[in-house]
Image (spheres, rainbow, N blue to C red):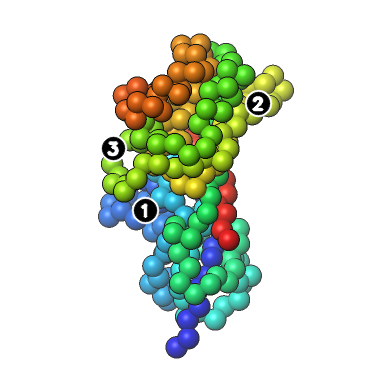
Amino acid sequence: MSERWLKLTVAYDGTAYAGWQIQPSHPTVQATLMEAWRAITGEQVTLTASGRTDAGVHALGQIVGLRTASKLECARLVQALNAKLPEDVVVTGVESAPNGFHATHDALTKWYRYQIHNSRVRPLMDRRYRWHLPQTLDVRAMQAAADLMVGRHDFACFETTGSERSSTVRTLTRVGVGQGGAAGEKIDFDVEGDGFLYNMVRGITGTLVEVGRGAREPQWVAEVLASRDRRNAGPNAPAHGLVLVEVRYA
């Protein structure tokens, strides 16, 4: 029986899940998607994802690769999957992929966004998706610190223990700080690069917040990078403010 490779784009609210990767006793996005696929096609497929988002982390553009013998058209698969999936997981697209497509290894860049609600009043509608910080943050200072992270560096200082990597060197093409909302209360950190270490974006966020609240000067970030020591950086920001926005391929 002939098989084909597909690329799925998946969005999800990670609040109720113990991350992407399947676990024996906790709900995960991978297991949820596999169950929906099996219900439609009868297949037990292997799913590869562009990144293993942690518990509570969200996605707008998670990319999932698989090989299937199903002949269902891509548009029909989108409809069928969404009819089976819970309301907090949505397949936004299905398309053909090259033979041997691997969502992790074939990715060129990933774009993450960390979202903050910077106001004395805590958010209501965004409470699941933004980290509430009541102390006013200095956006210009944070951007000055963020600029020091752009380029190819050893980012060991932002890696949390728990994942074995052959190298901690990565290239970041963008670390931007944006501000919006009626009173400037919405602050977003956009981080894009060729790869990320375990909890790296959350560590970067916690470090930029230290600068934003005036505890550190922007130049401190250069010292943190040079140290290659996680103990010298800021704390990890909470998981619920992090979103995987987009993954780019050739």
Q: Is residue 23 above or below residue 202?
A: below
Q: Is residue 178 above or below residue 133?
A: below
Q: Is residue 134 visible?
A: no
SS assignment at label 3: loop
Of marks 2 and 1, the one in the foreground = 2
Q: Residue at x 67, y 21 (%)?
A: 184
Label 3 close to label 2 by CB (< 8 Å): no
**SS category of the residue bearing label 1:** loop
Quadrant housing the C terminus: bottom right
Q: Name the N-terminal-most of marks 3 and 2.
A: 3
Percent position of residue 5, x then y? 50, 73
Task: Indicate which disc residue 161 carries.
Answer: 3
Which mark identifies residue 179?
Answer: 2
Query: Which residue corresponds to the image point at 27% horizontal and 55% vertical from the top-left?
Result: 24
Amino acid type of the residue tagged 2 in the rendering: Gln
| Tag shown at residue 21 | 1
CB contact under 8 Å: marks 2 and 1 = no
Kind of residue indicated by mark 1: Gln
Q: What residue occupies the far bottom of the structure in this picture?
A: 1
Q: Position of residue 7 (x, y in %)?
A: 54, 65
Q: Residues within 10 Å of mark 2 (few under 14, many from 20)?
A: some
Q: Give the residue type that dot 3 points to.
A: Thr
